[in-house]
Amino acid sequence: MSAETITPAPAPSDFIRDIVAGHVAEKRYAQIVTRFPPEPNGYLHIGHAKSICLNFGIAREQGGVCNLRFDDTNPAKEEIEYVESIVTDVRWLIAGWADHCLGFKPKGAKPSRTTVNGQPDYYLGPVPQAEIENRKSKIESEPFFASDYFDALYDHALELIKRGKAYVCDLSPEDTEKYRGAPDKPGRDSPFRNRRVAENLDLFTRMKAGEFPDGARSLRSKIDMASPNMWLRDPLLYRIRHLPHYHAGDKWCIYPLYDYAHCLSDYLEGVSHSLCSLEFVPHRALYDWVLESLDLPRPLPRQYEFAKLAPTYTLLSKRNILRLVQGKTVAGWDDPRLPTLSGLRRRGIPASALRKFVTGVGVTIYNSVTEIAVFEHAVREELNALATRRLAVLRPVKVVLTNIPAGEVLECEATNNPQDENPTTRKIALTREVFIEADDFAEVPPPKYFRLKPGGEVRLKYACIIRCDEVVKDSSGAITEIRCTAQLDTRSGQPNADKKVKGTIHWVSAADCMEAEVRLYDRLFTVPEPAAEADFLKVVNPKSLEVVTARLEASLATAKPADRFQFERLGYFALDPKDSTPAKPVFNRTITLKDTWAK
RNA sequence: UGCCCGAUGGUGUAAUGGUAGCACGAACGACUCUGACUCGUUCUGUCUAGGUUCGAGUCCUAGUCGGGCAGCCA
């Protein structure tokens, strides 16, 4: 399988890659290091895929590494369950593509004190996966955690205080907000802004020691309360939270805030390019301020921002997805209708299709909406190339081929994937009784209907042409069987094999098939922008999931969850990795085939 | 009524002062033992007004519209 995507894709180019390429050309950094820094407070979704592919993509293109780091500075929201799902999702998305660039660290490692050019420093560099795997003596590795840096961060905070660039503030959260002013009004200095260094040091130490309750004090940067940039009005660096941390344990009761922790985490790991979404543009000045205020000895990372992905007919914010999960609109974070990576994976979307899609939409500095059709196109393109063709009937109607004796089995040869360079084949059984799709027969056919109709002819794919002689109904008028004549000389290899008919339909032998539950998924929302609705629960698609009992070609009994199938003329399907059992197989419809007839 | 950012077909994106291109989509057609795939044709675009220049999508000014910013969230 190709490392990039199954089908060819152009080498990505965007303004960030241009910047990185420029830095590589001028040898600004020893190595290109990016990072993907999720907060473990929810599952990853397709929007994160864009960031993952950008960060890992740049790393692999430049021979660099991309650190997976948990931005876990808020113990109130974060959980180990999310850490595990995120690691799984990231590994899945980059497998066979950029997994060799995945930056982990030795298990339990924390930043170590070093000296660079005579200056004290902290450093915890990545160990690329490729290196971990090649080492003779296996080392255990794990992702990075911002919470592993709490000691170093605390140390740097002390330094900031000593430099007169941070102070302990006793203002309540409410008063802090009042003092901050408004976008068009300057803020006012905190009455605690000019505390002496010694007092700040004493108070901050006691904050750490747990002497004060939550919210009683905070550590603040000393920048400019009149700045037109709200994020420069002495933003908080530390807050008091008497809460245990899922990773750091109960050692801390003060926790750093994002703006303080993130830039320093980047620096500690030797990150060169810190990529984030547009809402952090105003934070960039603060990112730089923290790093520059510390007079650090190594090259500083730089932050660059890009627009988030916004596909139509879906919801991307963790908060909204959480609402769908908790409200039981969907069956869980991995429901195949959700844009979560675990949901998409379960639905059968190949990681390569996701990569192709998110890199194809490009990287810009303005928000835009991406039609979900672009995603669907990428999925079909990948699946068309790799999916094994099988015959399956979702809504079976019995057809009796009256000229084939009961018990007789006619072997037919079926192509496994016509897209392969040298397609292989398999044998399927044609018997007296077969099932065809209810949709493929019409008693009163609309104009240009190519399929089976009374007196009409149609080809059973890979088998022969049949003619409809009679329709048998029960007392309620429902069709119980369709009686046809099989034109056996139109089978492959027979004299009339080349006989043309307008329609070809799929079928399975009634004597040689299996039953399976098939879940037919459709988009979750009926409107392009559900997030713009007053209540998105009101625009949930009532037909987003339909469950049928289908008849499948017998060979599907050996299907494995990683297999990708095209049920001919219907769409792409994969075994549900969670609910399927050998005794009771469950297939998910990943996506339908394009249907120009339905229109 | 502050500061920052942006604006190219229906949608996404490219063109880095020199032919507005690609993709998705749509329409039509060819091919077809998948109404799929593939192939062909067609469709629609530089927000407005000034300015600089031989030449402006690109540079400048103003306007319009859109996005962001006032968590002890990230």
Image (cartoon, coloured by chain):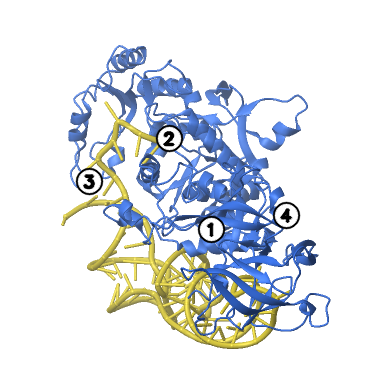
Chain colours: A blue, B yellow
- Subunit of label 4: A
Badge 1 or badge 4: first in the primary sequence? 1
Residue A230, x across and y down, in percent: 27, 41
Relative to A17, residue A477 above or below: below
Dots 1 and 3 on the same chain: yes
Question: What is the CA distance from the residue labelled 2 to the residue labelled 4?
Answer: 42 Å
Residue holding disc 2: A41
Residue holding disc 4: A555
Dots 1 and 2 on the same chain: yes
Residue holding disc 1: A14
Q: Residue A411's image quarter? A: bottom right
- Subunit of label 1: A
Question: What is the CA distance from the residue labelled 1 to the residue labelled 3?
Answer: 32 Å
Task: Identify the residue at image location x=54%, y=84%.
Answer: A448
Relative to A96, residue A423 above or below: below
SS at mark 3? Answer: loop
Amino acid beneath label 4: Ser
Badge 1 or badge 3: first in the primary sequence? 1
- Subunit of label 2: A
Amino acid beneath label 1: Asp
- Front of the two marks 3 and 2: 2
SS at mark 1? Answer: loop
Residue A74, x across and y down, in percent: 39, 29
Q: Residue B53's image quarter? A: bottom left
Nearest the eye: A402 or A590: A402
Residue holding disc 3: A183
Amino acid beneath label 2: Asn
- Front of the two marks 2 and 4: 4
- Front of the two marks 4 and 3: 4
Question: What is the CA distance from the residue labelled 1 to the residue labelled 2?
Answer: 30 Å
Badge 2 or badge 4: first in the primary sequence? 2
Q: Which mark is residue A247?
A: none
